[in-house]
Amino acid sequence: MPATVRFTGLDLDPMGTLNGREKKGPIPSSWLRIRFESDQGGNINKINKWLSANISGQWASYLVPLRFGVRVVIIAFESDTDAVMFRLKSGETAWATDTKDHI
């Protein structure tokens, strides 16, 4: 895959900005869901970038705001293996401390 994609004068990183593995729309009921609370604001874009770099299948993610800045993050995984890898890699917190720039 090329490092940069040029489209009408705009340079895009295909690994960071064009993520074809993030599912938009209705989530199939068969997908395994992981729910966790985040007091770090639950930056969904940063979570999705971390997922793109660390799992291989499709996923869907969304936030449910709670009080006092805490949000519930829900991630649905197409593959049970990806859900296990998310847990093994401490994905609930790793996305917030990941210093790599995936954009």
Image (cartoon, grey):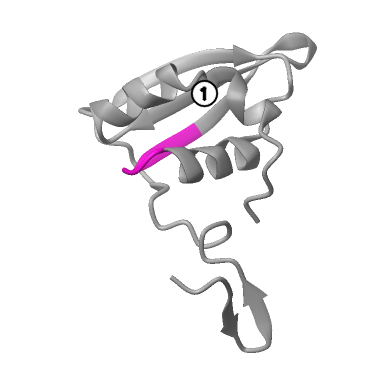
In this rendered view, identify the residue nearer to me: 1 or 14: 1
Which residue is outermost to the left? Answer: 30
Q: In which quarter of the image is the N terminus?
A: bottom left
Q: In this view, does 43 lie to the left or right of 84?
A: right
54 is higher (above) or lower (below) than 3: above
Residue visible at 25% across and 26% down?
80
- Residue projecting furthest to the right: 68
Please provide percent x and percent y for residue 59: 38, 39
**Residue at (58% x, 60% y) in the render:** 17
Residue found at x 66% / y 77%: 11
> Residue 92: percent from the left, percent from the top?
55, 19
On screen, residue 56 versus residue 93, left or right, reads left
The quarter holding residue 48 reads top right
Q: Nearer the viewer, residue 11 or 3?
A: 3
Report if residue 47 lies within the magenta region: no
Dot 1 surroundings within 10 Å: few (below 14), some, or many (20 or more)?
Answer: some
Relative to residue 22, is residue 11 depicted above or below?
Answer: below
Q: Is residue 60 magenta?
A: yes
Q: Which quadrant, please, contains the C terminus?
A: bottom right
Q: In this view, does 57 lie above or below 18?
A: above
Q: What stretch is highlighted in magenta?
A: 55-61
Residue 58 lies in quadrant? top left
Which residue is at a point 47% across and 56% down the rendered structure image? 19
**Mark 1 sits on what residue?**
91
Horizontally, residue 70 falls left or right of residue 73, namely right
Looking at this view, name the residue that lies furthest to the bottom. 8
State left or right for residue 58 relative to residue 15: left
Residue 94: x and y in percent read 60, 24
Which structural element holds mark 1?
A: helix
Indicate the amino acid at tag 1. Answer: Gly
In the rendered image, residue 20, in percent from the top left (x then y), is placed at 40, 58
